[in-house]
Structure formats: structure tokens, C-alpha cells
Image (cartoon, rainbow, N blue to C red):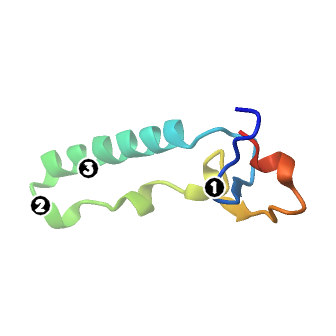
Amino acid sequence: MSRSRKKSPFMPITTARSEKEDKMLANRRHRRINKRLLNQTHDQDALLELRVLSNVWGFDKDGKRMVDPDLQRHLLRK
């Protein structure tokens, strides 16, 4: 495994390993609020979208960037 490399040269911008927990919390909040709205109004048009309720800029990871594989080989090592 000492010679294995990542195939795609994209790396996360921050040190967070994953956004899984942030996404789970945002979706849980989305479902809870929409369930409450649906029970109160009985109107499906009153439901809110996920983007209205959560801000992706508040997540731990801020996306990915492309690195140059020739200049930064150490980042592409597994």
C-alpha cells in the first residue's frame, strides 16, 4: 500500500473528515420542522425546502479544491 495513490486530485479545504454528521443534523431538523408544519396546516404547499432551513456554509467542510499532482504528491498518498 505504500505506492497507492488517489485517482482524483481533489482534496477537502478543511481538516474535517466528513460532512455526514452535519448533513444528518440538517435533514433531521428539516423533517422535524416540516412534520410540525404539515400537522398544523394540513397544506403541502407550506412545506419548507432544506436550503431554507440549513446553511451549508455552517458545515465543518467548505468544499473541495483541486491540487497539482506533480507539486503535491504527499497529499495524494493513501
Q: Which mark is residue 34?
A: 3
Q: Quadrant of the C terminus?
A: top right
Say what amino acid the circle numbered 2 marks: Asp
N-terminal of the pair, mark 3 or mark 1, is: 1
Residue at numbered disc 2: 43
Q: Which residue is mark 1?
A: 7
- For residue 25, side relative to residue 75 (left or right): left
**Residue mark closest to the camera, 3 vs 1:** 1
How far apart are the two marked residues, 1 and 2, measured between alpha carbons? 48 Å
Mark 3 lies on a secondary structure that is helix
- Amino acid at dot 3: Asn
Front disc: 1 or 2: 1
> What percent of the width, then of the height, locates residue 50?
38, 57
Q: Marks 3 and 2, Cα distance to the nearest angstrom? A: 11 Å
- Disc 1 to disc 2: CB gap under 8 Å: no
Q: Observer-nearest residue: 78 or 32?
A: 78
Q: CA distance from mark 3 to mark 1?
A: 40 Å
- Residue visible at 76% across and 33% down in the picture: 2
User: Which of the marked residues, 1 or 2, is nearer the chain's N terminus?
Assistant: 1
Amino acid type of the residue tagged 1 in the rendering: Lys
The quadrant in which residue 31 appears is top left
Q: Farthest left residue?
A: 42
- Dot 3 and dot 2 residues touching (CB under 8 Å): no
Q: Quadrant of the N terminus?
A: top right
